[in-house]
Image: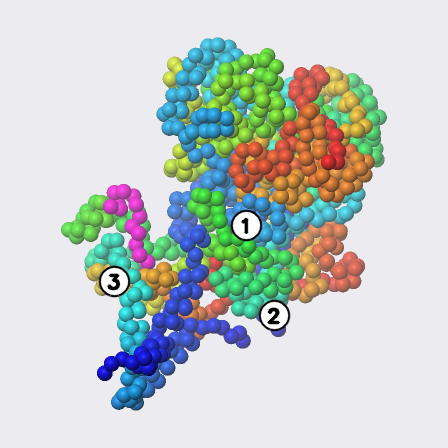
Amino acid sequence: MKAKEFNIKWGMVIDLDKCTGCGACMTACQVENNIAPMVDASNKLRTLSWMLVYELSNKKAAPDAEIAYLPRPCMQCGNPACVPVCPVVATDKNEEGGIVSQIYPRCIGCRYCMAACPYHARYFNWEDPVFPKGMEKALSPNTSARPRGVVEKCNFCHTRLMKAKDKARQEGGNPEALADGAYMPACVEVCPTGAITFGDLKNPEHKVHELAKNENAFRLLEKLGLAPQVYYMSKREWVRKLGDNYAATGKAGAAKKHS
Amino acid sequence: MGLDRRGFVKFVVGGVAGTLFTPVIWQGLDDASIWSQNWGWIPRVPKGEVKTKSALSKLCPSGCAVKVKVIEGKPFAAVGNAANPMSKGGVCPICAGGAQLLYSPARVKSPMKKVGEGKFEAIKWEDAEALLVEKLTPLKGQEGKIAAISGDETGSANEVLSALLSGLGNAGGFAVMPGEMYTATRGVKLMGGNGQPGFDIEGADLVLMIGADALDSWGTSVANLKAFAASHPTGGAATAQYIYAGPTLNNTASVCDKWLAVPPTATATFSLALAHALIEAGAVSSAADFAEYKALAAKAAAGFEAATGLKAEALKELAAKIKAAKAPLVVAGASFGQGAGALDFVAAASLNVLLGRVGQKGGMTVLGAAPKAIASAADRENAKDAASLLAQVATGKAAPAALLIYEANPAYALPQAAEMAKAMGNIAFKVSFSTYMDETAALADLILPAPHPYERYDDAMNPYGVAKATYLAGKPVLKQPVLDVKDPVDVLLAAAGKLGLSLGFETYADVIKAKAKALGADFDALAAGGIWNGEPKGGALSLGAGALAKAAPAAADEKAVALAPVTRLAYGSATLATPPANLLNVRDTELKGKDLFVQLNAATAKKLGVAEGNKVKLSAGGAEVKALVHVNEGVAANTAAILLGFGRSAWDEFTKGKGDNVYKILTVSDEAGTGLKVWAGSTVTVAKV
Amino acid sequence: MKTQFSVAKFDQKLQERWGEVMEEKKQCKGCGGALPFVIGFVAAVIAGWVLFPDLIYSKKTQPIRFSHKVHQEQGMECSSCHTFRDDGSYAGLPTNEKCMECHADVVGSDPDEAKYVEQYAKTGKEVPWLVYQYQPDNVIFSHKAHESFECKSCHPDMSKNDTPPVYYQNRLSGYSKQTMKMWQCERCHAENGVSNACHVCHK
């Protein structure tokens, strides 16, 4: 199946050298997307973390030990592995911007997409979204609550894209050429160090356009050819190596596949 | 014509066939599928206009200036307020979930009176306030009979509390929860200064953080993070170096250019040994006590390798980097925000004096005393610390009959917590002004629910760490609180009136507005996220050699390891258990089910004879904490790192009974020369169970 | 191309087969042995087309008899009350704030106006209007994006309406009878070359 090309590609460049792993992005994501808190959130097989901050280690003994934090949203792959496996077309990548779409009421919960996604970006609702009494009054208007039995994932806070477009229309601008920063997901908005830069990878006026081409930029599991729209960057070589940047050759400086 | 069986069957078949040609089945199926998409128990999301309102969100220790997003009058999200020059649009992981905390299951819903062991009964506000006045009336004028503990470092509520106590003849009864501000202010005094220290992280080109977890839980963390971010442009070259010296490879250290693993028992030794390396590299100071300081530094350098497990080379490299920097800054603090002695502070802060960085741009400052709204309020630095107060209560040296607890959780968040909670039992009448049902509220005789930050007026004077005098204020986002709560200060002011004491104000809002006026600031501008800044001050500081000379070297105990309690801002604070939404952030190598993990590096684990996944107990001071071992190279030598803030016995199902309370095994000792209670250098024994 | 389950196709088939049935029915006249079958068939068809809609929908009336006609006669435009906010979001039905610009106190003689003032304007309670085009939580619809269409292309023309029409609520799904179904949205999007990706309409 040939991947669709879009004129707009919403993407992130996450500077891992600026991520302290504070977790504000994870909190903001839950708030924006109405993810109910779990009593035992240490059972990571059951939690829903559209945005998840991983801890990376260089595996060296102190004093040479180093760690880095890696926030992992949905990669919004250019060739998503999750889309073709969906038997009910509850997920697709078919919209300008390249965000991988999903419709919850149609999902039958077969979880093929979860098996297909190499980034573990998809989550299954093992439980109904039950909020502590009263907390359902603090729900965000931006995402519907999903029932038990459906799969969900990060969608770059797509409702914010819709709202940004409406705002552009209201102000007489072009909704298909949003200014840098007019649309940003919740995680990007709250990040206290601004580690996540967000924008249209194809628009030269957006910062991500250049940043994605930075010599320290890489994508996770590049060799799989899924062409994620999320880039990472780090000056630390061990971090880039863990991201599988040049797994194909094992050597630094190997040609990077950029779209 | 009668209807026979055959005819009936034909009729029914006809009916079924006919039904197929009607919308009954098709529409029924369609409607049923829609029905199945909207179960009644799945919460509905609000529709309507989203508005934003400014608030001062004092959920985290330093307070975040936020914009609260509100729909149908209900807050649902919070983001940073870009108009605020301090946090510059940033928000911390606690305040980002502030709207959800309005409905925290742990919130106290109405005034409660204790009616038996662990049993409470909801009462009306008028009865609760009458009870408060009734209990305080006979104690009025009796020195030592009323005490108060405040867990708020920055609010003007402290002025009201302390003025109230003075007015009732108990001027000495005001105590504060231990924090950096408390010890650091004393440290500055030992260096011949007066006031709270500040650190201009934004202006420095090399930031050495000794202990201070400045990019996560120390000081004004969001402002610090913004300063870090500004010096590290994405895709560009960094304009400042950040170095962390502390017991764990924590969030701060993860983005630093260098992490120096310093056990919490060796913080002062590290600082002084670094001073020695700097002096060797040519640093001189005109401070009068330089000669004495130099000798102390040389002594410390001799014991450096043994105390820290680091190579002396590392120090030399660091000293060279500092010498090469134009505006180096040393940020001094305890790795978990409290319990470090004044001497640990002095040792680290003296480096700024040695480098001539006091009062310079990107250096260390000393903030003068802030103007007060209530003249009779005591100065903050004259307050007792709560640990000392409760220690006196335990031994009978102090015998207050009433204790007012404001936004503090001394029964949980003081070292040797179990003993502190026990000491509280000696006080006949305890009132807890608390937003949440915390461990202290659970021990109180009267609980007076305090509002959530979105429901109250509040302010913050000089949140710890700011380089120049700073004032923030906020007003309620909500017209009506979501629960039956009242502002503690309003309650106290009303009670004062009934006790025949006038503090000059009727509400907390008036106090804050008066304070803003005293500073020459516009309250409305402040409430919109503005800020008031005073001029930074320097002031001559000594190297504190006189005080440092008295420091007793830590007694080496072969069997014990240093205890490094770890704080992560996202997991809560001394006054806030992990918010439900933030539990997701906790790693399964930190907490799994109900078990906490103790982090040990491989060498320490080997020495202790324990391995990954082993169940161990950490004992000290007659108390113990159970945990599982996680081998983690991000921990200093001979150090056991473990998360602080778990092991709750009150609160809600999200936190209750998870992990263990590490405060229990922090052992208090008296610091030589300062008389302060310290527990940052606690040691524990680790044994398999 | 993808195959998609489409209500549109069903509907179309339904209508085709309905035609066939009518044909059959005509031919069947006089087949005595099949009479019970025909009676049963006709009865079911009548029940399904006449009684069923009555049963499946509950009828509701608006809390206030709001007259669009009267308001239009005052020279008001649709957009006087159904406005876009500054951020481009659509305000939908006006809230008390808007209504009270004129009706903070009774200005006319209509009893429903008095009812509004007394029960809502004075108490600050919002009127629980019934929304004919109600869409569930999982739908996001931008009026701004559809601004080039006339309101009437999707909504009933209310301008001449003196008494609000009866609100039919589906007893099973809880939706309004006029709620636009997904196939209708999809068809128009397809015809106009607009993406039908899930998130274009769902949240």
What's the chain of the residue with tag 3? Answer: C
- Classify 10 Å Cα crowding around label 1: few (below 14), some (14-19), many (20 and above): many
Q: Is residue B74 in view from this perspective?
A: yes
Pointer 3: what residue?
A: C165
- Classify 10 Å Cα crowding around label 3: few (below 14), some (14-19), many (20 and above): some
Pointer 1: what residue?
A: A29
Give the foreground label among 2 and 1.
Answer: 1
At mark 1, the secondary structure is: helix
What's the chain of the residue with tag 2? Answer: A
Q: Is residue C130 magenta?
A: yes
Q: Amino acid at mark 1?
A: Cys
Residue sitting at x 40%, y 17%: B134
Mark 3 and mark 2 residues within 8 Å of each other at the beta carbon: no
Pointer 2: what residue?
A: A3
Look at the picture and state if A145 lies above or below B583. below
- Classify 10 Å Cα crowding around label 2: few (below 14), some (14-19), many (20 and above): few
| Colour treatment of the image | rainbow
